[in-house]
Amino acid sequence: MKKIVPYLLIGIVLTAAVLLIFTGDTASKKKLDERMSFRKQDKIPYGAYVAYESLRSLFPRSSVSAGNNSPGNWDSLSFYDEGQALIIISPMFFADEFEMKKIIRFAEAGNDVFISTSILSEDAKNVMSFGISYVDVFQLIARKDPKDTLKVRLEKPVFSNTKTYRYPGKRFDTYFFRMDTSITTVLGTGRDVDTNFVHLKAGKGNLYLHLAPMTFTNYFLLRDDNIRYYEHILSVIPPGTKKIVWDEYYLAKRRSYNSPPDQDNKGWMSTLFEYPALKWALLTALFTLLVYALMEMRRKQRYIPVVAKPKNDSLDFVKTIGRLYYDKGDHKNLCRKMSAYFLEHVRNRYKLATGNLNDDFVRNLQFKTGIHEEEIRSIVYFIRDMETAPAITGHQLAHFHKQLESFYNKT
């Protein structure tokens, strides 16, 4: 057997070399970079290079700059001057109460604040008295879906152009299901005519909240004539504005909350596999070690009988009841029972109160379980917003079940 090993290893190396030669072209083909960076300098599909560079042509008389300081610590903006504009584009807007007060105070002084995001912190929603639906957004973060296409439009009478703009990229948008109509003006809608763009008056200034940040990415703006949507949506900022600041503070802050996977932080194996030669060298080495281990494995003890795993009859009963509800199409009721079981599990095992499903609850559960915070946030937000949703589809039910199964398996 030992005499055969050298020849076997030589054959493996030659096979790997042949595969490397004939598959090198395929491995070198570029794939679509799906990182959702939203950064002004990024020219990738979901960067914001086009949006930022277009500001100077849209506002030729304005001073355009970028910043990344927290509200109240801006370098170029002042609470005592008028005619300024703050633009914040981020998939997640995790402003606390103190930061929201600073932003509103800035607007009340006679300035404009434009925020485009999909997910708002509880403090931000409470300050502005908004209710936002997250039922679908977490399903669109990490998987491809034929329905994952974005459609937006502007509304009359503020805008004369009510054309629908779309592109085949990621949606990652949300919509308002509750707002104070006495102080809020609807400016735009998204899929199924759901409101996604509103205006609020703040003292002598204005605050605009937009829930489809993907419309500011390079992919969307360079598709067909979608740049017109960008021009119209920013026309709410007066052309005589003195200073315009593109703020990226919340792009940095979202990383502390374990933001949705934009692939900025790839693992070391993914980084090594970006180089074809190194990739095949590693695979060849791993395969060689596997063959060596298989050839050297010999039974050195008597056969150990396989012990059958005890059957879990209670689990079968639960599955039967679940299928009964599913066959009846009562998805929302089934989701309620799954949610109740999940919360009971959390109370009994981790000794956490489940009366207030907020960001603190998510962080405490993440600390005790060690599971990625975004997975827990997706489950908690679905449970919290489920009752306000008009209906739960079979697709949403299946996704919610997969999330719960993943949580139980990891804990």
Image (cartoon, grey):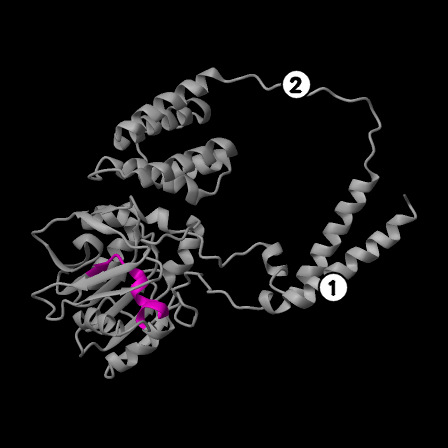
In the rendered structure, which amino acid carries the disc numbered 2?
Answer: Val
Residues rendered magenta in the picture: 208-221
* Residue 88 located left or right of residue 266: left
Q: Nearer the viewer, mark 2 or mark 1?
A: 1
* Residue 232 located left or right of residue 320: left
Q: Which of 309/352 is in front?
A: 309
Give residue 101's quadrant in the image: bottom left
Above or below residue 229? Residue 102 is: above
In the rendered structure, which amino acid carries the disc numbered 1?
Answer: Ala
Residue under the point 46% across and 64% down: 33
* Residue 262 located left or right of residue 280: left
Q: Which residue is mark 2?
A: 307
Above or below residue 386? Residue 16 is: below
Image location (x, y in percent) of residue 329: 26, 31
Looking at the image, which residue sits at the far right?
A: 3
Location of the N terminus by quadrant is top right
Above or below residue 341? Residue 136 is: below
Q: Earlier in the sequence, mark 2 or mark 1?
A: 1
Image location (x, y in percent) of residue 240: 18, 79
Image location (x, y in percent) of residue 333: 26, 28
Residue under the point 12% across and 49% down: 180
Q: Which residue is mark 1?
A: 17
Any mark on residue 279, and which?
none
Q: Which of 266/224 is in front?
A: 224
Q: Secondary structure at mark 2?
A: loop
Report if residue 411 is visible in the image: no
Q: CA–CA distance between discs 2 and 1?
A: 44 Å
Residue under the point 34% across and 54% down: 146
- Does residue 215 belong to the magenta stretch? yes
Give residue 50's quadrant in the image: bottom left
Q: Secondary structure at mark 1?
A: helix
